[in-house]
Image (cartoon, rainbow, N blue to C red):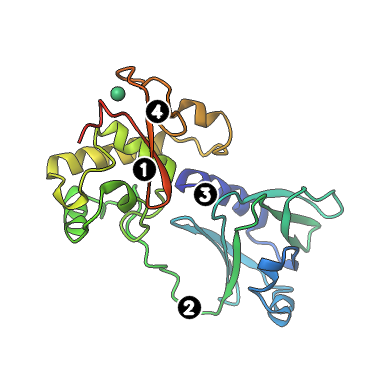
Amino acid sequence: MPELPEVESAVRRLRAAAAGKRVARLELLHPSLARRIAPAKLRSLRGARVRAVERRGKHQLFILDDGRVLHAHFRMTGDWTVGRAGETLPRFARAVISFDDGTRVVLDDPRALSTLDVHPRGADLSFGLGPEPSDSALTAEYLQTALAKRRGPIKPALLDQRLVAGLGNIYAAESLWHARISPHARASLLAPKRLAALLAAIRKVIDRATGARYTDESVSRLAVYDREGKPCRRCRTPIERVVQAGRSTYFCPTCQAD
Ligand SMILES: [Zn+2]
């Protein structure tokens, strides 16, 4: 699942490929996308200039010069393929944004869960997101206050974009391992010192991530994610996997004891 570093990397490529250009056509190749944007609205995008490409959490925004916003979210397996009109489409092409200079970006998504939406000028685009890891508003005190009301364990809480924007399943697990915090620890009971360690770990993990595709060799450098049964990189205890709130959690039962 693309997380903040991967989405930031995608946004940079998208910005290089799209900013300043005029949209010639947006084609929706998958029915789930076609249901989201009516044909008349699709046609109305023709000729709109992409003023800027921005990221908010894991949301990607094409800011158009008429104030409207084309909003993309990769969900599980989306990515952009940049190319030129007339080239063979990738196998899992779901949408094509063609520009008036003959270039295009293709939304390539094997699982077809990505979304595209058009928001009117002036729409609220905060998406209820909490601060990002790089944001100075994200402090141990903020985490303590935000987590005080929560009943459950820390790992699922870290996936809530209202708490911290951009963190997903991979980097939440990695951060907890670096901070030596059990994924089962009650979120509301974590002491300020441990929250400070968690915050430092989140920043370290996010900064270290290259933004390479999460399916690439970046996975082989991970400490716990997808390493069930393999030795902990710190203490050699086999990494365990549990399911929390429907998502796999990987952790070291020794380093991250309750
Ligand atoms: Zn360990």
Q: CA distance from mark 2 to mark 1?
A: 30 Å
Residue 124 rendering spot, x and y as whole percentages? 44, 75
- Is label 2 in contact with label 1 (beta carbons under 8 Å)? no
Question: Between marks 4 and 1, how big is the CA–CA gap?
Answer: 12 Å
Q: Is residue 29 left or right of residue 150?
A: right
In this rendering, which labeled residue sits more in front, label 2 or label 1? 1
Q: Earlier in the sequence, mark 2 or mark 1?
A: 2
Residue highlighted by disc 1:
172
Residue found farthest to the right: 86
- The image position of residue 125, as x and y in percent, is 45, 70
Mark toward the start of the polypeptide (2 vs 3):
3
Q: Compare marks 1 and 3 and give the one earlier in the sequence.
A: 3
SS of the residue under disc 3? helix
- The answer to whether residue 78 is left or right of residue 92 is left
Dot 1: few (<14), some (14–19), or many (≥20) neighbours within 10 Å?
many
Judge by depth and name the residue closer to the eye, 195 or 204.
195
Kind of residue sitting beneath label 3: Val
Which residue matches tag 3?
A: 7
Q: Quadrant of residue 52?
A: bottom right
What residue sits right under mark 4 in the picture?
Answer: 223
Residue 131: name its quadrant.
bottom left
Q: Amino acid at mark 1?
A: Ala
Q: Position of residue 54 (x, y in %)?
A: 51, 59
